[in-house]
Image (tube, rainbow, N blue to C red):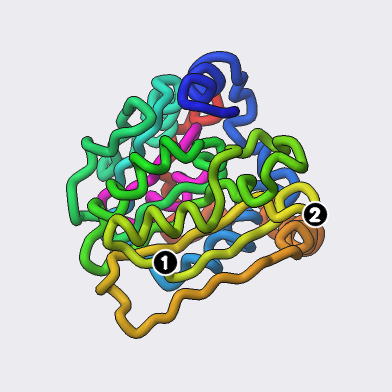
Amino acid sequence: MPDLNWNKAVWQGSYHWNDAGEEWSTSWGGSEAQWFGSIYPRLHRFLPARRILEIAPGFGRWTRYLLPACEEFVGIDLSDKCTAACQKRFAGAKHAQFITNDGRSLEAAQDRAFDLIFSFDSLVHAEYDVLAFYIPQIISKLSPVGVAFIHHSNLLTYNGTIGQPHGRALTVSADAVADLVYRASGTVLVQEIANWGGEHLIDCLTLCSHKNTFPSVQPVRHKNSMFMSEATLIRDFQSPYSRLPEPQSKPGAATLESPDAAA
């Protein structure tokens, strides 16, 4: 299983990072198309945000879209390699800091401070023991109006009957994460149980908050067996637009990324 030692060995050591994580957005036609076609529509209520915490940013595939949408940003990753890559790539972002942790602790982030806590395509490899550390801390780091958007495994639902596709954590499910949220005095707003790279619903997107942040909201859970069909539509019909060059005279065209970010 992808335990903490496995995650450290892969993302700090053996993984090549040649494409800075872009290879995982191929099904959407690239990370820009995936962000604006798939992720941002699910988060648009909460962006921009004053303070954002990203857990496991990797080489900054999603960080590049989060940074312009906040006043303060903290990225926490268990890999020194990833932390250094983000520090280099986003050297122009003076409102951002990138910190290496032990894969369990969010102590470096301020309590009750973050309007959005975000993790996508990373904690799917985190087993239950790691999420049991992270989820209570995530709830404690949220501001009174904050939400957390966490992409995690749902593979426990299949009880080992389908193997371990895409390195998903074996001991995590939508139910398990919801239970951790409620035990930490949080509440689930939305859980979207989705397929990834096939027909099985092996992933879950959990949106949660403090229990009193949205007192009138009833939790929603739905199964989305068309998540990868959505990816195909984005790849085939939206991504061609994102591959066009930006006009040089575009207002606000200054980038937060270093000129040699791809190096």
Quadrant for residue 116, please give it.
bottom left
174 above or below 78? below
Disc 2 crowd rating (10 Å Cα; few below 14, some 14-19, many 20+) is few
Q: Which of marks 2 and 1 precedes in the sequence? A: 1
Instruction: Out of 198 and 244, give the one closest to the viewer.
Output: 198
218 above or below 147? below
Disc 1 crowd rating (10 Å Cα; few below 14, some 14-19, many 20+) is many
Does the CB distance between marks 1 and 2 fall below 8 Å?
A: no
Callout 2 secondary element:
loop
Instruction: Out of 84 and 193, give the one closest to the viewer.
Output: 193
What residue lies at 60% left-to-right and 38% top-to-bottom?
170
Q: Position of residue 147 (x, y in %)?
A: 35, 63
Q: Give, as a three-letter code, the residue at label 2.
A: Glu
Quadrant for residue 167, please give it.
top right
**Which region of the structure is painted magenta?**
53-72
Instruction: Out of 137 and 89, give the one closest to the viewer.
Output: 137
Q: Position of residue 176 (x, y in %)?
A: 48, 52
Q: Position of residue 97 (x, y in %)?
A: 28, 36
Q: Give, as a three-letter code, the residue at label 1.
A: Val
Q: Mark 1 points at which residue?
A: 188
Q: Mark 2 points at which residue?
A: 199
